[in-house]
Amino acid sequence: MIFPALLTILLAAFAVLSWRNQKLGIVLLFTLLPTYLIRLDVGPIPSTLLEGFVLITIALAVLRLRSETAQRAVSTVWESFGWYRAPIVLIVIAGIVSTVIAPDTLSALGILKAYIIEPILLALVIKSVMPDRADTERIITALIASATVVGTLAILQALTHFGIPDAWAIENRATSLYDYPNAVGLFIAPIMAMAVVRFFNRIISVRTSPPPTPSINGGRGITEWLPSIYGGAGGGAILLMLGGIVAAKTEAALIAVPVALVIIGLLAPIAGRIKYAIIAATIAGASAVMIFVPSIVQKITLHDSSGLVRRAQWSETLTMLADRPFLGAGLNGYPVVLTPYHNATFYEIFQYPHNIFLNVWSELGLIGLIGLIIGAILIIRTAWRRKDDALVLAFAAAILTMTIHGLVDVPFFKNDLAILTVFCLIGMMVKKESK
């Protein structure tokens, strides 16, 4: 009885705080994304502590919509999504269809609400309540804080060998708060990419700003200390996040982050000589890695043991999808539907195909895959048109990191990652800084 009572107190406290300060509640929610690991039941319906926070945030926002003015504001927010409304609508339609045809309708409904409906409703709330750049920055700070804690715990685990599940103890792969190591990289990597872009932009902005007015006592004013403050806090957080990924030995994340940052660096409006330096450093670094760490070539070309599993898994998935090209397997139906096609018995059937395109195609059918492709095109278009906006580039770096990592893993289809993905999407639409 103590555990349910404690969860009730936590949810009630969050509700009171969010009612008194809606913005603070949303920022706190993003700090607490890993709380989806705490499971609870609401009657016969399984849920999580994070889902409780999300539903409270949405419910309180609805309670505030009492006037016609507020209702018109919601309509305005939806219209502000512009062309992004098309992939969102397609994915919602695909989710509903995939729930109907899923082998287990009840579990599919759980996935639909937690991974699609609730994150989209939360996005509408955030965009209406926290539309300003400063608000967006606060949420990013909350994400960095959360990822830094996850990374720090992973480092401590790797150093002490304490708390690592038996399945990963031999390889000493840290899992931090999670049940498996890859979850650490999936959560930290996009946030780290975002943090790196913001870190360099802040350092450059402070160093190129006008000289500060000397302090009265002749000493260094706070403005003069800002580069050191940003450098210390931001750099320390990035190092702890990187350390967490290394401790978890999530190799796909270690590849995805630098590749995404190089692409964003080439896209950013920086001096040509710096771009040439980035290209040269990338070529030199890649060459050195291939020479001194030959195993990484096998990893990238999928010729190591995990790569062989992925290739077999994708082959079987494509065979299954050839028979079900329009509907796919249905939400949460992949393990059941793939069973008749599973001949490579040297690996178990996983929950998802471990490829971003196959994941979406299998779970959401062809409609969902089309929605994903349209969304990707819109994101590329936005990043190109607003490449002079460092905040947009930070979100583009996060989305690109998730996409690259997702070529061999499962982004989005997890409670925290679904919310993170949707936030990055609305972050791409953040208003331009006023002049």
Image (tube, helix red, strand yellow):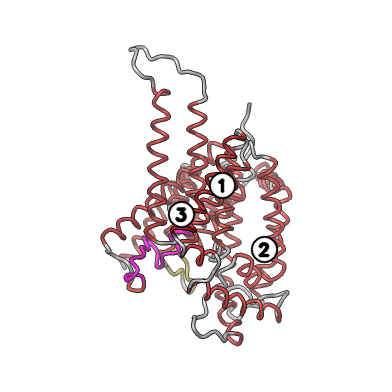
Q: Residue at x 39, y 38 (%)?
A: 233
Badge 3 local density, few (<14 within 10 Å), some, or many (20+)? many
Q: Which residue does the numbered mark 3 point to in the structure image?
A: 188
Q: Which amino acid does label 1 sit on?
A: Val
Q: Residue at x 47, y 71 (%)?
A: 46
Question: Total number of numbered labels?
Answer: 3
Q: Main secondary structure of the magenta part?
A: loop
> What is the C-alpha distance between the residues marked 2 and 3?
27 Å
Badge 2 local density, few (<14 within 10 Å), some, or many (20+)? some
On the image, the x and y values in percent for residue 318 come to 66, 76
Q: In which quarter of the image is the N terminus?
A: bottom left
Q: What residue type is labelled 3?
A: Ile
Q: Which mark sits nearer the N-terminus, 2 or 3?
A: 2
Taking depth in this image into account, of 273 and 52 the one nearest to the observer is 273
Local secondary structure at mark 1: helix
Q: Does the magenta stretch include residue 169?
A: yes
Q: What mark, if any, has residue 238 been given in the picture?
A: none
Q: Is 212 left or right of 330, judged from the image as shown?
A: left
Say above or below: 259 vs 131.
below
> What is the C-alpha distance between the residues marked 3 and 1?
18 Å
Q: Which mark sits nearer the N-terminus, 1 or 2?
A: 2
Magenta residues?
A: 168-187
Q: What mark, if any, has residue 92 been given in the picture?
A: 2
Taking depth in this image into account, of 352 and 404 the one nearest to the observer is 404
Say above or below: 351 vs 391.
below
Badge 1 local density, few (<14 within 10 Å), some, or many (20+)? some
Taking depth in this image into account, of 295 and 425 the one nearest to the observer is 295
On the image, the x and y values in percent for residue 401 come to 55, 54
